[in-house]
Amino acid sequence: MLHQIKTGTPTDLPPLLIAHGLYGSARNWGVIAKRLSDSRQIIAVDMRNHGESPWFSSHNYMDLAEDLAGVVAANGGKMDVLGHSMGGKAAMMLALTHPQMVNRLVVADIAPVAYSHSQTQFIDAMRAVDLTRIEKRSDADARLAETVEDPSVRAFLLQSLDVPARRWRLNLDVLERDMPRIVGWPDPGGQFDGPVLFLSGGASDYVTSAQRPQIKSLFPGARFAKIPGAGHWLHAEAPRPFEASLRAFLS
């Protein structure tokens, strides 16, 4: 079972399941989870090979969807689901393979398509940090700065560093090996006929108008919205507009 962080108590509204993106964790969503918990219970998970969840020898979207299905089954059998990036693809796969488990679906800045970019440069950067010489998080930040220029990206990656244990809470070997599957899309077929919001950053190119026919073929009820000025990490860059969009759609 995936590691879960529950915020708030059950209400008349369905609980909201949050699936984070690559190299992330449930803790990344703490502020949004706390704010949304005024009306429903929020259950954020660490995806497999991330955070406090178990490490497995595979990392593909059928596996990730089954992991999420286990969480839904253990928490009443039907939930609203929000997924960002990798977590968005896992959430889409859950809706396509277990439609009875998903009430409403929010897909944050990702589409059901294969992308050409890889994210292995960050694995290389994390591996290049000599953890035996790290005494505090700022030491690791200084080492990461040699290869990762953006301080916000470094801060994001460092949330997955266990400084006392001198280890990354990420299964870097499996994530690197399965990167083609992570940036890809297995095209499972089927449809999810429930309400879906594709919420993307206005400054991001992950979701384009050219992808809409593919999205509509799988999610005929899909609606689209953009947060002006926000990039791929729209929930971190524009948390209040992101929260407002969620509330409007989920209610």
Image: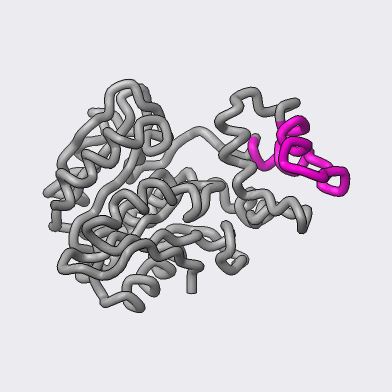
**Which is more toward the observer, 6 or 245?**
6
**Which is more toward the observer, 80 or 163?**
163
Colour scheme of this structure image? one colour
Q: Position of residue 53 (x, y in %)?
A: 56, 66
Q: Where is residue 165 in the image (x, y as percent from the top left)?
A: 77, 58
- Determine whether 216 is above or below 94 in the image: above
Count of numbered badges drawn on the protein: 0
Report the residue at 30% width, 24% height from top.
Answer: 202
Stretch in magenta: 122-144
- Determine whether 147 is above or below 34 in the image: above
Inspect this view and state whether residue 96 appears.
no
**Residue 125 sits in which quadrant?**
top right
Report the residue at 36% width, 42% height from top.
Answer: 113
> Viewed as shown, does residue 189 lie left or right of 123?
left
- Determine whether 245 is above or below 50 in the image: above
> Viewed as shown, does residue 46 lie left or right of 173?
left
Q: Looking at this rendering, what residue extends furthest in the right direction? A: 133
**Residue 141 sits in which quadrant?**
top right
The question of residue 193 being in magenta is answered with no
Report the residue at 48% width, 74% height from top.
Answer: 1
The question of residue 126 being in magenta is answered with yes
**Residue 233 sits in which quadrant?**
top left
Q: Position of residue 115 (x, y in %)?
A: 44, 37
| Magenta stretch, main secondary structure class | helix
Q: Where is residue 243 in the image (x, y as percent from the top left)?
A: 28, 41
Inspect this view and state whether residue 197 appears.
yes
Report the residue at 29% width, 60% height from top.
Answer: 16
